[in-house]
Image (cartoon, coloured by chain):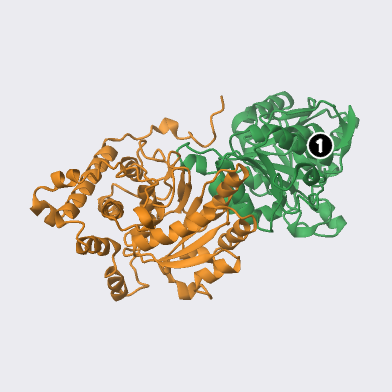
Chain colours: A green, B orange
Amino acid sequence: MITTTYREALRSALREALVKDPRAFLMGEDVGRYGGSYAVSKGLLAELGPDRIRDTPLSELTFVGAGIGAALGGMRPIVEVMTVNFSLLALDQIVNNAATIRHMSGGQFSIPLVIRMATGAGRQLAAQHAHSFEGWYAHIPGIRILAPATLEDARGMLWTALEDPDPVLIFEHQALYNMEGPLAEDAGPVDIDRAAVRRPGKDVSLITYGGTLGKTRQAADTLASDGVDAEVIDLRTLRPLDMPTLLASVKKTHRAVIVDEGWRSGSLAAEISARLAEEAFFELDAPIARVCSAEVPIPYPKHLEDAALPQPATIVAAARETVGRRG
Amino acid sequence: MSTEAAATGHVATGYVATGYVASGFSRTNVGSQPDAAGHPIGRDHGLRLLHEMLRIRRFEEKCAELYSAGTIRGFLHLYIGEEAVAVGAMQTLSREDAVVATYREHGHALARGLSMDRLMAEMYGKREGCSHGRGGSMHVFDAATRFYGGNAIVAGGLPIAVGLALADKLQQRPRVTACFFGDGAVAEGAFHESLNLAALWKLPVLFLCENNLYAMGTRIERAQSQTDLCAKAQSYLVPAEAVDGMDAFAVECATRRAADAVRQGAGPRFIEYRTYRFRAHSMFDAELYRDKSEVETWKQRDPIPALAARLRESGVVSETLLSAVEDSVAEEIAEAVAFAEAGSWEPVADLLNDVYTVRP
């Protein structure tokens, strides 16, 4: 095992992909000389050169669209968008082209494109740099949505995504970049189809992904000290959802709490709730609960930002309510 | 068949006798060259351009008829009046080059060499269509001719063209990506971002702007503070040229100059084709925004009769031969309609196909 960070794991994955596949290249704002706004691509320009590590103008719509075109032209582009809020400037290309061209062309053209971006709140970046729109993207057929929450997934999802013939969006929670921990020295590609049980338990299923996985595990530890044995599920892939894993968990625990940093209305948590109600209604011993962000643009002051986001304490409270043990 | 052609009574024979069909471009017109000395007005070449324009004109007239009959549905945007642009420009491309077009793309598809049968089947929504019926009029795609849509978001194709060209440059392939769009696209951010990026990275893109003066119903002066579109391209250091888009020869010559420069690695070029749409924006447009007299004035410059007259006056082409061309086009359209009629509907059980690639 080595000790590494989420950022270093991402960089190691990028480097390996670029070395292994001559068709792969990275493009985005400040990915080269600056080293990436989150320093993920630091050092890669010097090693791989400007053809493979391409600094772009501030033109999200066009460099994402150019990624689509380059994929059509036989390349394997990895496009970095600085944050999910900025990706809205490229939404037209992602939704109207990347997600549709295979279908509109009657299956003639696939788009093997990977788009990476930072998402989520927690660093006092206020209301234009801290939202969680991955749930929106998960609404769209034609693309695959990934949310690596662990070092293994930060290291392993990129290569599998690059091998996918269709567009894959990878959402890296910005609070995770400094997360440090052990990683196998030979860590490599991982599957991008299945959710993972991060902590087995029998009393309640805590279903989450990305930046809230750590908070949810903390909540599970607190619940354990109260005698509540929570199972923690990491979705990993937000589209398509791995329903068999979720249903198996709920059939065991009969209770579900969904933790999602998106706003509650129309959220991914809403979709999962609906599916559990549709597919496992008679397994449930309590109403499904959701812990989401408050319905407010993310505020700047720390105490208000904290209050707007799911926190271990709010997850614990929701789980206790679900199992009928009010704290 | 025109009345005139019918009256001559021996059109089919005359047509075949010219050797025009044997030259092999009639339905797969990719990469044809003008005559020697760079002068494109040879008889065969002139006939070729006329034939290609007529195929588009008559195909779309048939589509309008089928639309009125309810056979074709959705949106139908006709290119009638602008045929000289697609036909002239397409002469300068090779099979390896790529084409990106808009939702008004039947003309580009036909001039590029897509089968009229498969294009008509696409208009019907049949499985035998070039996009297997999933796209319809606005989303024509064809891998065999590197035709990348059929994009119905104004300016949506420009970034894709930039990326196709980037892929060529990175793989050191001497190809050109021809990207067609209208004057309306020039007001979109994607136009400015794409010209900037293509110029910055010296990418082999031909930005081909069909200025028909109207973005749907909004005339260019009402939408753009600077109506000199070449000036906008030049502001990104992209060399630009405006050309008469009602003259297929002029279009071809200007496009060839630009394509040659692009092929030599000089970076992107921009051409503004000054043209005009004779028909409504779509089949739902009452045309309240322009005077009938303006349309009539432009129709005086209809590129098809203009070229026919030019060929006749130069004495290289007889009335009989021109009628034969009409006849051949009518026959091809009849075959395309029959092909589409005979096509099949995709079973509803296949509804979810082609959303994701089937992985082995």
Q: Residues within 10 Å of mark 1 (few under 14, many from 20)?
A: many
Q: Quadrant of the C terminus of chain B?
A: top right
Q: Which residue is nearer to you in this view: A136 or B46?
A: B46
Q: Is residue B358 visible?
A: yes
Q: Is residue B201 above or below residue A139?
A: below
Secondary-structure class at tag 1: helix
Quick one: which residue is furthest to the front in this view?
B37
Residue located 81% across and 41% down the image: A315
Where residue A66 sits: x, y (%)?
Answer: 60, 50
On the rendered structure, is B224 left or right of A253? left
Q: Which residue is nearer to you in this view: B332 or B293?
A: B332
Which chain letter matches label 1? A
Residue A75 falls in image quadrant: top right
Where residue B156 sits: x, y (%)?
Answer: 53, 54
On the rendered structure, is B18 left or right of B161? left
Where residue B176 sits: x, y (%)?
Answer: 51, 50
Q: Is residue A270 above or below residue B58?
A: above
Residue B126 falls in image quadrant: top left
Residue topped by disc 1 = A9
The total of numbered circles placed on residues is: 1
Where residue A52 sits: x, y (%)?
Answer: 70, 44
Q: Is residue B13 above or below residue B237?
A: above
On the rendered structure, is B281 left or right of B271? left
Q: Is residue A235 visible?
A: no
Residue located 57% across and 39% down the image: A74
Amino acid type for the residue under numbered disc 1: Ala
Residue located 48% across and 36% down the image: A107
Residue A298 falls in image quadrant: bottom right
Q: Which residue is nearer to you in this view: A119 or B117?
A: B117
